[in-house]
Amino acid sequence: MENYQQNDHRVRAGEAQEDQITATMESFSSKLPSSFYLGAAVAAIIGSLTFKMAGKDHHALFVGQWAAPFLLLGIYNKMVKQHGSDALSRGETAQRSNPASTTGIAA
């Protein structure tokens, strides 16, 4: 058990900070509703189907691959809105005294 705690390299809340570029990007993207990203993914799927029906297979594949990144950006946007982007900016501190308390492992 001691060996596990010595080799635990996970980052806990408050141990690492985001830079200003990330914070600026998140401040702009968090203003968009999560439905924007879902709509963009659906639009990419519809666009891909339109290209496919027009016989433009390469265009259909290109546009169709946009759906997954839009959905991932929507998930990231939702997480930033719910949890914030940086624990230190919210005044939280890392729990360094007992790392087992955050991992759910009994000491």
Image (spheres, grey):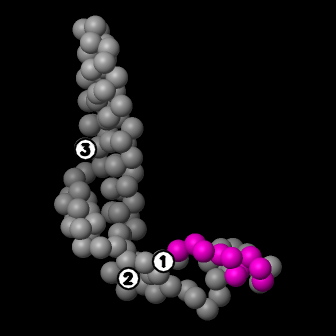
**Label 3 to label 1: alpha-carbon separation:** 29 Å
To which residue does mark 2 refer? 88
**Disc 1 residue type (three-letter):** Ala
Which residue occupies 64% across, 83% down? Answer: 99
**Label 1 to label 2: alpha-carbon separation:** 8 Å
Q: Quadrant of residue 27?
A: bottom left
**Which mark is nearer the camera, 3 or 1?**
1
**Label 2 to label 3: alpha-carbon separation:** 29 Å
Of the numbered discs 2 and 3, the one sitting upstream in the chain is 3
User: Which residue lies most toward the bottom here?
Assistant: 97
**Which mark is nearer the camera, 2 or 3?**
2
Q: Nearer the viewer, residue 95 or 20?
A: 20
Give percent across and percent down for residue 98.
65, 88
**Disc 3 residue type (three-letter):** Phe
Give percent across and percent down for residue 91.
37, 86
Q: Quadrant of residue 85?
A: bottom left
To which residue does mark 1 refer? 13
Image: magenta residue range: 2-11
Of the numbered discs 3 and 1, the one sitting upstream in the chain is 1
User: Which residue lies most toward the right here?
Assistant: 1
Q: What element does badge 2 sit on?
A: helix
Q: Is residue 93 left or right of residue 103?
A: left
Of the numbered discs 1 and 2, the one sitting upstream in the chain is 1
Q: What element does badge 3 sit on?
A: helix
Callout 2: 10 Å neighbours few (<14), some, many (20+)? some
Is residue 86 visible to the viewer in this orientation of the structure?
yes
Which residue occupies 39% across, 51% down? Answer: 75
To which residue does mark 3 refer? 36
